[in-house]
Each structure stands twice: as structure tokens, then as C-alpha cells.
Image (cartoon, rainbow, N blue to C red):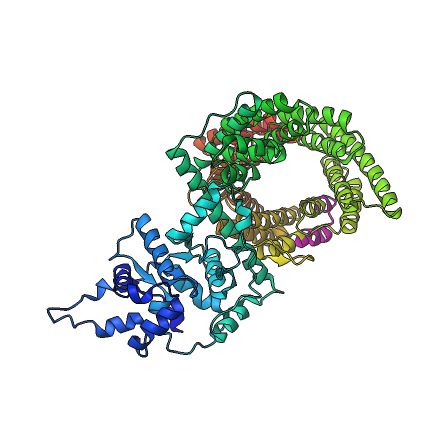
Amino acid sequence: ESLMSFTNGLSLASIKKFVQKESEVIGQNDSYWVWDSVLKEVTEDRSYLEYLKKTAPKPDKKSAVPPEEFLGKTNLYVSHVWSNKFRDTMQAVFTWCEEKGMQDNKTFVWMDVFCLNLHASAQPVGDMMDKYKEPLKKVGQMVLVLDSWNTNGPDVKWPTRLWCLWELYVCKASGISFEVILSPENRELLTRYLLEDGAVEDLVVQPSVGEAQTSESPDWTSIRGTLEVGNNTKKALVNNLVKVEVRHFYIDFAKKVLSSQAADKPPPPPPPGLLGELMGHVTKAWEAVEKIPEQIPGVEEVRSSPALEIVGFHATRSLRTAGLKIVHHPPALSQLNYHLALTLRNAGQLEEGLKMLTERLDCQQKVVGRESQEAVETMQALGDLYCQLGKFSVAQAMYQGVLDIVSTRAAGTLHHAKAMCDLAYVNRRMGGKKLEEALKLYTEALRIQKKTQTRRRLMLEAGMEADMSECLICLALSLIGVAAVLYDLARHKEADSCYEEAERFLGAAHASPTHEAYTGYYSGCAVNLAAMLKFTEAEEAIQKLIDQTKREYDGFINDEGEAVGGPSKEAAAKVAAAFVVQGKIRLLQGKSESARAHESFYEARRKAQEWLPEGVVIGDVCAMAMADAVMGLADAGRLTGASDRKNAEMYEAALKMRRRASPVPDADVAMADILTNLSKAQRGIGTAIMVKNSLENAAKAWSIYNLVLGDKHTKTINAQRGMS
């Protein structure tokens, strides 16, 4: 049990004094040797920390050593490998603390070799997470000392030690601050490797919790027992988490090396011509990424972009080398620019994001031509971005440009069908007369996809290779799109038939339960069934989506033995969104189901709130889900007879949340929906000021509906009536 208490730590000053005093004895020996040959005998039956407490002079003597000089509340936990050279481990800690500006007499370290009573025999302690998480959270930060600069090297021991893997997992799962660190010698070796164009991916280890060991068998039993929950799910999640965190450490280290090299010796100017222009664009993108705060949604995707990794890993000596590598990764560049544009949007720099993506398109068209695959991918990315921003007319022009090129260059292919589906989607979002155009496009896409399905089936029958799964999923997505249009046209029975056919295709494709197609299928099918007043079937469909999103949030192992999902902001937002749909379906059933609707919206709000950042940032998915949930709670309250004033307060709370999180509040239909309901509640209150506010909010809602959906859409017309 003493292992689970990290209350008291040894001062950094005392540790340095010990290392200096025993320097010659310690030499190049590891922590095992230091314990057996130096600490074990002198400490008798206690930890080194307890030994110092016992042997310190009493406070009333002149030579007294105040306890605070060596003992204090722990503020740094050190995870390390005992087989590493003790001196290297301590130098890594000392260097890190110095760089962080931590004072020797105010830094209190919990490190097992000093603070744990190693004379006592270890005993199994049951669920390790319950006993380990809270004490470690009180410490607040941890450093993990790697025993080699190359975690994939032949002599490295760290990935095989169960305690190290466990400690990193607990830190990540608890949201505790931690860093991976190296000794000065290992840092020098890693720097040299990177400067010689070494690939970072070659350094990243694939750990295996199932094979990792501990020195004491009870420790192994306790940790493994905690991780054996849920068909090895936790073990696989730990393996994946450790790999990701080590990879992040190497990426950050590579960037620091590159930055320091640039500061010491400015890189040569980029080569003239188009190659230089292309490389300059990527460099500009990289500089933009470095300025974006880490809490902005999307930063992680941008920083892990293959294009930036190419720069970070290979541009340490020659920009020309980096540029040539970049030219041969055009899809990576398209992905980089798309994610960068989205992230800049989330950081409140929308125009800058669009500008960078547009510049990228111009550059590509010059380098490889307007009809090149690279240019088409960037046009596609621009269309996606404008669509997310609610600028459907601009998105439509982009998607139409893609379709024009693809229909000439790749007619009758799945790529051609996808271009049709993208254009159909934006037409559907525009509503009105565009719905019929969307239906025609989806229908033509289905015709192409079914022809492809037939060809691939014949290829398989002839013993040739063919990816049938991809084709079946494309068919399912198109059918879900057709069904959505039919729903908008109030042709619910036809929509229901499309959803049934889409489900068959998804089953035949053996699509992963987490595939986006299933989210669209279950939510769309449930809403359509509710419109047909088939509420029991609708509840069953949306419950399947809730169960699946919860499973994805908890994490599971797929058929290939890979870890899927796990707690994250995005997974939490999916769970919350599913509960919101469930709540809306229950509201449609009338007052009798309003209490259950309230439960659904409450669950949505609870899940979104768990991941809600302080000072909500633009584009935060959980903030958006939170706004939808609060609006649903207000709708449920209105149905049960809550006062207009109470409803107005709820809608104002939802509006405030949505306004802070929405990237485009002036073109956000969900924002307009909240404004409409707020206007109704304010009108119901009836005071002069509230009626005035009601009119202003109705006008704002009409403006958004008119801009995004057009003047013929039902919501626009109803908003105009509300103003009247």
C-alpha cells in the first residue's frame, strides 16, 4: 500500500548531494546496483527517504537539518528503467528540471529507488487504477526517462518494463502533465541521427503490454489484472497510446533540432522556379502551424500531417532535399492544407486558411496542371471546407469543377460517382429546387456504382483480385444520400426502402461498426421512421447508434486484433450527438415522452461537458454538441409547460454556447434554429423589451436561413412569418 502514496518526495538538492557524494562508487552502474550496493545496507528496513528523516539531527540542536531541506510535498514523479545507467537517469532529470527553471530546494521528487521501501515484499493490491490514479493526480506531473535515444534499438529495455508502460497510461488517462526525456548523452546521439537525415518512424517502438515484465511477480499480477478487462481492450489501447506518445516526443524533438539549426545557420534559399514556389508554400504552412495554440481543435491533425513530417524529419540540412521529397507526396500536401485551413478557421483565422488553400491550388495548377490529380484533390478540399462553412454556392462551384474534370478523365469509375455524390450533397443542403438535382445526381452515381459492383463480382468469379468492400460501402453511402433527399421531399416510404437497401450493402461489405456510413444510416433511418410515426423502430435504430458510439468511446478490439477508439473529444461528441437525435425523436411523440426526451438531452449535455474546454474555442465539437443538448432541454421544457421566461433562459444559454463555438455564426443554420425558438419564448413573455428582442432574433434567424437555405426554404418562410 505504501507504493500508492506519493505524498512526500525527496528534494532535488538532496538527490544531487547523494549523486555527487557517491559519484565514484556509482560509476557506470545501473539502479539495481545502486540499490544493492549503496542504499540497501544503509537504509536497513526502510526507504532512503525514511532513513534521512530518522537520521536527521533533532530541530533543537545547532546542527539541525530542517526537514524541508530534504522532504516536501511531491511535485515531480519520475518513471525510469532500473537497468539504465543510474547516472544517465539522474542527469536526464537534472537537465530537465534546470531547463524548466525548477529550484533544487523547491522540487520534491518521488522516485522508487529513493522513496519506496524496497525491503518489504510486494503484495497484490487489486485494481491498480483506483489506487494509483488519484495519488498521482495530486503530484501533478511526471517525467519518463528513456534508456536509449532509439526506442526501437536492440538494447533498449524501457518498452519491455510493465511499470513504465503502466505509469504512462495512467498519466494520459488522468490528464496529468508528463514529458518523455533523455540524458544529455542520448540527446546528443538523437540529434546527430536526425541531422544525418535519419527517419523518425524507424525509432518508434511497437510496445506489447502482454509481453512486458516486472521485477516482482505481485506487481505483474496487479497491473495485468487491471488491464485484463474487456477482451484485452485496455492492453491494446495502452500499446497504441504508448506508441503515439513516443512518436510525438520524436516529432517535437526533431522540430527543436531543425529550429536550432536554422537559428545557427540560416538554410540556403529555395531553388528558383516552381519547385521553390511549392517549397515556400509548405514552409509558410509549417510556420503557420507553429503559431496556433495547442488547444485549438485540429492542431493535432495538422502537426501529424505527413507533409510536415517530411519537412521536420528531412529538412535539417537541405531545403532542396526536403522540397523534392514534398513534390513526391502531393496527397500529403492536399491533406496538410485542408487540415491547416480548418485549424486556422477554428483559431478565428478563416480568411487566412482559405487563402492558403487557394494559393496551394494555384501553385498545383502551375506545377502539374489544372486537371492533375493533385489539383483535383485540393479543389475537393476547398469544396469540403466551404461546405462546412455553410457557403454552399461556392462549394457547389468547386464540386462542379471537380466533376467536370473527373467525368472526362475517369468517367464511369467510383471516383466519378463520388464527385457526383459530393455535388448532390451540397445541392441537398441548398434545398428547394436543388433537391431534385441532388436526387438525379445520386441516382446516376448509384448506376455507376452498381455497374462497378457487377464488374468486380465477375472479376472475383474469374479468380482475379477486386475490392468489393469499397464498392459496397460507396453504394451504401449513395443510398443514404438518396434517402436523405427523399426525406427532405417528405417521401418517407421511399426513403425507408433506401435505408433498408443501404443496410444490406453495409452488412455485405463487413464495414466496421465505427464507419461514418453507419452513423449516417442509423441517425437518418431513425429520424425518417419517426416522421412515419414508427416510433418504436425509430427508438431501436437510434439506440443502436448510441450503443455503438459508446463502444467506440470506451475502445474495443476489431476482428484484426487492432485497438479501435478510446476516450476522446471526438468520440464524446458522437455519443452526445446520438443522444440529441434520440431526444428529438422522443419530443416528436408528444408530451407523454417529454420526460424521456429530457433524459436524452441531459445525457448528451453530460457527455459533452466532460470534454468541454475552459473558455470554449471556435470549432470545438463538444461545445457544439453542448449547445444542441441545451436547446433540446429547452424544447423539452416548453413541451411540459415550463414558463416562457425559463425557456428563454435556456435558449439564451444554448445560443451563447453555439456563438462561442461556431466558426461561422452568421451562416450557421443550428444558430438560426436557436434564435427562432428564443424569439418565440421572448414573444411569449410579452414585455415591450422582450418583444423588441424577439423581433431582432427572428430577423437574425431569417437572415441566416435566407443566406444558407434560400428564400424558398420552409425555415426561411416560417422565419419571415415570425417576424411579421
Farthest left residue?
62
Residue 316 image offset from top left, x and y in percent: 47, 37
Residue 113 image offset from top left, x and y in percent: 36, 68
Q: Which residues are magenta?
A: 528-544
Name the side, left or right, on which 125 lies relative to 574: left
Quarter holding the C terminus? top right
Task: State how many labels appear.
Answer: 0
Residue 387 image offset from top left, x and y in percent: 62, 31
In the displayed structure, 200 sits above or below 289; it is below
**Between 488 and 306, which is closer to the camera in this rendering?**
306
**Between 139 and 187, which is closer to the camera in this rendering?**
187
Name the side, left or right, on which 461 lies relative to 600: right
| Residue displayed at 48% across by 46% down | 193
| Residue displayed at 37% across by 77% down | 119
Residue 706 visible at all: yes
Within the magenta stretch, is there residue 277? Answer: no
Residue 358 image offset from top left, x and y in percent: 57, 24
Provide the major secondary structure of the magenta segment. Answer: helix
Name the side, left or right, on which 53 lies relative to 692: left
In the displayed structure, 645 sits above or below 419; it is below
Residue 672 visible at all: no
Residue 551 picture quarter: bottom right
**Between 139 and 501, which is closer to the camera in this rendering?**
139
Residue 528 picture quarter: top right
In the displayed structure, 509 sits above or below 405; it is below
Quarter holding the N terminus? bottom left
| Residue displayed at 53% across by 28% down | 279
Name the side, left or right, on which 354 lies relative to 426: left
